[in-house]
Image: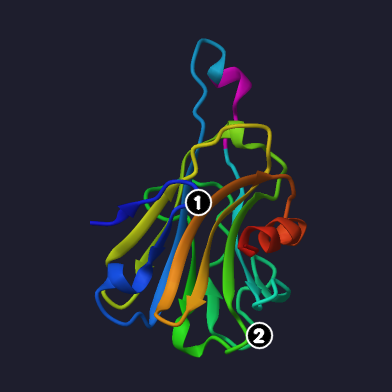
């Protein structure tokens, strides 16, 4: 059973997997808030929410090395691949995912910071049931889940980050709210999240 993380909680993904991790998938899921009441049908013809999952690759000093997002679906070295843009949040399960081949990551990459943004500018008051989760891609086992429950007028969240350690990879849940329509807008928050 996956660990449900709280903000600022860190776990060893190696211990959770029980074996050496080779590939993981970060899945992001969300639903648009469904309006209720008498005027709901009149006022809400389009409830689609376009959230975008992204991965910012940082070195040990917190400097950006690469970015995987809806405008660049693959890292320069090919070790990270984005599933593509989901513009509605409709349907069950993960709406977007980012596959990471941990064995192929360049040695200079120490941290992978996962962010989510509302490209259309709708804030998180319009989002419900948002989560991110880490899955062992080879076994299908969900290792950890972090619910993004903060409602508010923010348009972005630094969700979580992976850190390379001597024992493997650690996952830290962050949940820092921010404003920005793309991952590029959250690069400072991402770097701040991994600094001790």
Quick one: 21 or 194, which is closer to the camera? 194
Mark 2 near mark 1, Cβ–Cβ under 8 Å? no
In percent of width and height, residue 163 lies at 52, 72
Toward the top, the furthest residue is 38
If you read the primary sequence from the N terminus, does the residue marked by circle 2 or circle 1 appear first?
A: 1
Residue at the spot of label 2: 76
Indicate whether 151 appears above or below 106: above
The residues colored magenta run 41-47
SS at badge 1: loop
Q: Is residue 43 shown in magenta?
A: yes
Indicate whether 73 appears above or below 127: below
Residue at the spot of label 1: 8
**Along the horizontal axis of the image, is 68 left or right of 93?**
right
In percent of width and height, residue 25 lies at 42, 69
Q: Residues within 10 Å of mark 2 (few under 14, many from 20)?
A: few
In percent of width and height, residue 42 lies at 60, 18
Q: Is residue 130 shown in magenta?
A: no
The answer to whether residue 140 of the structure is visible from this angle is no
Residue at image point 70% right, 55% down:
189
Indicate whether 136 appears above or below 157: below
Quick one: 131 or 95, which is closer to the camera? 131
Q: Residues within 10 Å of mark 1 (few under 14, many from 20)?
A: few
Quick one: 26 or 191, which is closer to the camera? 191
Q: Quadrant of the C terminus?
A: bottom right
Q: Quadrant of the N terminus?
A: bottom left
Residue at image point 36% right, 66% down:
135
In percent of width and height, residue 28 lies at 48, 55
SS at badge 2: loop
């Amino acid at each position: 059973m996956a660990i449900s993380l709280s903000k600022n909680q860190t776990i060893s993904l190696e211990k959770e997997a029980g074996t050496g991790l080779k590939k993981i998938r970060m899945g992001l899921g969300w639903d648009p808030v469904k309006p209720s009441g008498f005027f709901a049908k009149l006022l809400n013809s389009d409830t689609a929410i376009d959230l975008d999952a992204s991965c910012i690759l940082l070195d040990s000093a917190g400097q950006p090395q690469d970015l995987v997002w809806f405008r660049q679906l693959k890292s320069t070295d090919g070790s990270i691949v984005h599933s593509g843009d989901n513009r509605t949040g409709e349907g069950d399960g993960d709406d977007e995912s980012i596959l990471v081949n941990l064995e192929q990551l360049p040695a200079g990459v120490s941290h992978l910071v996962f962010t989510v943004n509302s490209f259309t500018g709708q804030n998180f008051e319009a989002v419900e049931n948002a989560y991110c989760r880490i899955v062992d891609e080879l076994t299908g086992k969900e290792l950890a889940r972090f619910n993004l429950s903060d409602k508010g007028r923010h348009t972005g969240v630094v969700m979580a980050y992976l850190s390379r350690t001597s024992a493997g990879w650690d996952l830290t849940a962050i949940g820092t709210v921010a404003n920005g329509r793309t991952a590029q807008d959250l690069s400072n928050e991402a770097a701040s999240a991994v600094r001790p």
